[in-house]
Image (cartoon, rainbow, N blue to C red):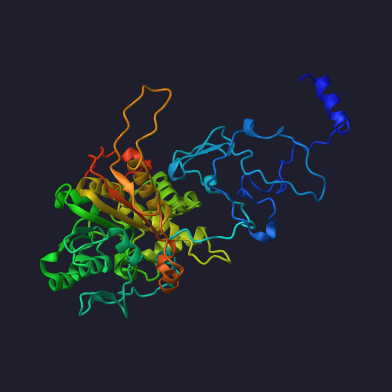
């Protein structure tokens, strides 16, 4: 269309010709210069600042050529309301595990650690974001307060076995999360062989035993295995305890022999309750965090790793936007004296990232999460366990996994999606034979706990259950690239595990 024809059509439509006022220096959005484009989710057009919108920080932004209209579009008249465009001006690529790679260097250079906190960005004043709990509820409750200066380390609640074999901590027994849903997905029968990859307090194992099945229970925590001996004595040869990570399943179970494999991912509340284990700063204790009580500890990471690795561990695994600031503070503090206790690490973090008035979570919570996940190699252990389950489950066997935060759930979701699909071809590549499905989805793709369970057991609030049923197709090759895990100086795989 020529320019003259365009002008004639606009005149016919009643559009007045003449000078147009364009504010080139002002972003084309009603939130003004103080807010980054894309800070609001879709459908936010009718909400104002009083609605406390949460920014859509995980959305993939479009480039400038995808914008509707020129970069200096005419602004609405005063008092007018315009739809919020969340995809305007976000010159970034968000990859797996929230690594941000600048396309045009708009927000400064990459300093080598490859973690860019702007990928998590909301407005710096926090006026449009009500902080939420990113961590499992059991973590949030345990880590709300830092220890007082000079507080004595607490030994934690006594732990042992009840008369019926139920493992107890303190005054009340541990409550397994989504027990009814897990049993429904596993469907244990008297002649079934089930592997419980996360024995912990024995909640799932005990319920499976009561259904008449035989259980092989794994746990790398020697305390959990020791406390489970009373349960084993009660049920005789129907319960076998294995002190090993669940990723070593194939070293202890024959191929295609299991009727079910269940995992309850993450740290247990009993481990948080024991100050000597160093998982929590609620009570001051040694900076440890090792589930297996051997190998690399959190103190080794905090005092020995360079600042770039600390930034990526805290930022990616802990989902902490202030990771660079916290990592540099840790390096400065350890130059004065090694950081050896949970209390001192929490104090170092709080000094540079103080708690805000409305915050209910201690500033160190996400840092502790990142360190714990790294020290215990939790993400790669989960990935290895899923591959092992594919080998060890018989046709019709059930895989049931309960996760508590997005990093874990992402791995399970990707594995099930890959194993329940034949793989999409590409028009740029030669045609390939469709892959046989090694799993089918069992029930709903994802199940959440009921409102009644959340009220009775707040730890269940962030739980998600995914289940799949094994087919008779051969197991596919184990490819860790499927999960896009971050490139970190991970600890060596556990003994008996696979690289």
User: In the depicted view, which residue is nearer to us: 158 or 197?
Assistant: 197
Task: Please provide percent x and percent y for residue 119.
Answer: 53, 45
Residue located 30% across and 47% down the image = 383
Q: Is residue 336 visible?
A: no
- Up the image or down, 176 lies above or below 486; here it is below
Horizontal arrangement in the rendering, residue 26 relative to residue 362 (left or right): right
- Up the image or down, 102 lies above or below 459; here it is above
Number of numbered callouts drawn = 0
Task: Please provide percent x and percent y for residue 209.
Answer: 20, 67
Horizontal arrangement in the rendering, residue 97 relative to residue 236 (left or right): right
The C terminus: image quadrant: top left
Horizontal arrangement in the rendering, residue 191 relative to residue 347 (left or right): left
User: In the depicted view, which residue is nearer to us: 169 or 126?
Assistant: 169
Residue located 82% across and 45% down the image = 77
Q: Is residue 49 visible?
A: yes
Q: Quadrant of residue 16?
A: top right
- Up the image or down, 430 lies above or below 483; here it is above
The N terminus: image quadrant: top right
Horizontal arrangement in the rendering, residue 77 relative to residue 178 (left or right): right
User: In the depicted view, which residue is nearer to us: 230 or 439?
Assistant: 439
Task: Please provide percent x and percent y for residue 483.
Answer: 36, 42
Task: Please provide percent x and percent y for residue 10.
Answer: 84, 29
């Amino acid at each position: 269309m020529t320019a003259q024809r365009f002008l004639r059509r606009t005149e016919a439509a009643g559009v007045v010709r003449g000078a147009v006022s364009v504010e080139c220096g002002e972003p084309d959005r009603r939130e003004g210069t103080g807010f980054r484009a894309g800070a609001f989710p879709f459908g936010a057009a009718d909400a104002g600042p009083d609605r406390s919108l949460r920014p859509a920080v995980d959305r993939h932004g479009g480039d400038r050529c995808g914008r509707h209209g020129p970069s200096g579009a005419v602004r609405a008249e005063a008092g007018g309301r315009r739809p919020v465009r969340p995809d305007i001006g976000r010159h970034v690529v968000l990859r797996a595990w929230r690594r941000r790679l600048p396309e045009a260097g708009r927000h400064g250079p990459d300093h080598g650690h490859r973690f860019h906190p702007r990928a998590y960005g909301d407005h710096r004043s926090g006026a449009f974001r009500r902080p939420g709990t990113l961590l499992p509820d059991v973590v949030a409750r345990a880590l709300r307060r830092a220890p007082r200066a000079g507080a004595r380390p607490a030994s934690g609640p006594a732990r042992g076995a009840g008369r019926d074999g139920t493992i107890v901590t303190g005054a009340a027994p541990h409550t397994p999360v989504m027990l009814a849903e897990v049993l429904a997905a596993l469907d244990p029968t008297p002649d079934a062989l089930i592997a419980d990859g996360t024995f912990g307090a024995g909640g799932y194992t005990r319920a499976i035993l009561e259904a008449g099945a035989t259980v092989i229970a794994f746990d790398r925590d020697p305390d959990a295995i020791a406390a489970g001996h009373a349960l084993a004595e009660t049920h005789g040869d129907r319960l076998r305890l294995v002190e090993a990570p669940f990723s070593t399943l194939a070293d202890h179970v024959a191929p295609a022999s299991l009727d079910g494999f269940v995992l309850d991912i993450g740290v247990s509340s009993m481990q948080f309750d024991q100050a000597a284990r160093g998982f929590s700063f609620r009570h001051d204790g040694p900076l440890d965090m090792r589930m297996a009580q051997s190998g690399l500890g959190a103190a080794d990471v905090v005092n020995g790793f360079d600042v770039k690795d600390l930034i990526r561990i805290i930022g990616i695994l802990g989902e902490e936007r202030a990771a660079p600031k916290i990592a540099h503070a840790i390096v400065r503090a350890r130059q004065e004296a090694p950081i050896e206790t949970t209390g001192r690490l929490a104090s170092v973090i709080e000094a540079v990232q103080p708690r805000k008035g409305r915050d209910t979570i201690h500033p160190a919570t996400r840092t502790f999460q990142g360190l714990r996940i790294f020290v215990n190699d939790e993400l790669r252990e989960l990935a290895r366990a899923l591959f092992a389950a594919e080998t060890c489950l018989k046709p019709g066997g059930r895989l049931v996994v309960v996760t508590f935060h997005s990093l874990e759930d992402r791995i399970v979701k990707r594995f099930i999606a890959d194993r329940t699909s034949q793989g999409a071809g590409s028009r740029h590549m030669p045609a390939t034979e469709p892959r046989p499905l090694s799993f089918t989805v069992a029930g709903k793709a994802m199940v959440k706990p009921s409102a009644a369970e959340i009220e009775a057991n707040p730890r269940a609030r962030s739980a998600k259950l995914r289940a799949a049923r094994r087919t008779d197709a051969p197991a596919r090759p184990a490819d860790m690239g499927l999960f896009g895990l971050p490139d970190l100086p991970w600890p060596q795989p556990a003994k008996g595990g696979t690289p």
